[in-house]
Amino acid sequence: MATKSRGSRSGKATAAAGKGRAVKAGSPPAAILKPELEQIRRRIDEIDAGLHDLINQRARLAQQVGISKHASGHTVDFYRPEREAQVLRLALERNRESRGPLPDEEVLRLFREIMSACLAQQEPLKIAFLGPEGTFTQQAVLKHFGHSVRALPLTSIEEVFREVESDTADFGVVPIENSSEGTVNNTLDMFLTSPLGICGEVELRIHQNLMGRMASLADVQRVCAHPQALAQCRGWLAEHMPGIERVPVASNAEGARRARDEEGTAAIASSAAAEVYGLNMLVPEIEDRPDNATRFLVIGRKAFPASGDDRTTLLVSAAHTDAPGALFRLLEPFSRHRISMTRIESRPSRRRKWDYVFFIDLEGHADQEPLATALSQLKGQASLFRILGSYPKAVQ
């Protein structure tokens, strides 16, 4: 529908421009509309100047907001994920109502970068992530926070948590689940001992690419990648590279580094990793499922108000997990109050053998009804009850 509308506008412009003269079919528009092209370019320059002025105004207002909140505060004190989520949702709504020519993804990216730059006027946010450079987690950092941050690549999920706990980093970004391969248990387990909470989430479409220094698949002797990446591509590898050794490594970026340094080694990684490590893209998008996506969590030290479209994550355990109906009694308040539960995972509690805790994702914010009442009822019958975070859903 949008394509038709754009085509209609384009047709009207061409007809108007060709008024009073013959237009040869198939001629390049630039050759026909040269005077009009110069006029359009002048108009673009005027709009650019207006946009620049508006961006400057926005940046000055952002400065005033920061000063009014805390004159001697740091950037992290001014960061409000619920407000950013609201701004992005409004941008999406406007783009869809106006049927603008830019896709939603590009509009989100533009507004994210403007907010990122405005926030970083005094100092950039420091964001710890599971590195090294070129990982999908780094892409998630940039998608959520924009490029005006200081990204800190670390070697493990545990390190990401520790850097945020020690105040070395303002926030951290860690993977939590993949749409085809399930949960990242290391991340869940860290919440059993860490005081940190969840401040946001990022959903990233994952394209796995085969890359290496060689020019042909015939020269590949082994493929290195994170175990999740190997699993996401197992069908393609079985069909196109049977008998080739598959080597699991700590991260896809580590696989890309080995592909750069080792003869005969190829890697499965993001297109960004191919650029970082100077590798040839042998075969793009080899993931088995076209809807392959990974969800990441933003972890931090404080809670935030509701944004209007939120998710809440709990860590709970029943008094006697082996008693009949124990899990039902934990979940029953959600059914009674019509709360949608979108995910539940069990993990060993580490308190005693065969004792488990449950990680639960729910629709809504913990401070708002009806979820607030349901949580109050649940708390009374749980041996372990902790709200890990109420945070804006990923804006897509």
Image: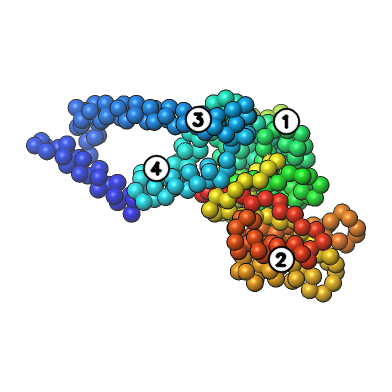
Task: Kindly report the distance in space between the C-alpha atoms of the residues bearing marks 3 and 1.
Answer: 26 Å
Task: Kindly report the distance in space between the C-alpha atoms of the residues bearing marks 1 and 4.
Answer: 38 Å
Q: Secondary structure at mark 1?
A: loop
**Above/below status of 318 relative to 367:** below
Q: Earlier in the sequence, mark 4 or mark 2?
A: 4
Find disc 3 in the rendering and name its residue: 64
Find disc 4 in the rendering and name its residue: 102
> What is the residue that sits farthest to the bottom in this orientation?
324
Mark in the foreground, 3 or 4 = 3
| Amino acid bearing label 4 | Leu
Q: Earlier in the sequence, mark 3 or mark 2?
A: 3
Find disc 1 in the rendering and name its residue: 168
Mark in the foreground, 4 or 2 = 2
Q: Secondary structure at mark 2?
A: helix
| Amino acid bearing label 1 | Thr
Q: Which of the two residues, 166 or 201, is positioned nearer the viewer here?
A: 166
Within the image, what quadrant is residue 103 found in? top left
| Amino acid bearing label 3 | Gln
Compared across the picture, whether 321 is left or right of 389 comes to right
Q: Residue at x 39, y 47 (%)?
A: 94
Residue 155 visible here? no
Q: Which mark is residue 367?
A: none
| Amino acid bearing label 2 | Gln
Q: Secondary structure at mark 4?
A: loop
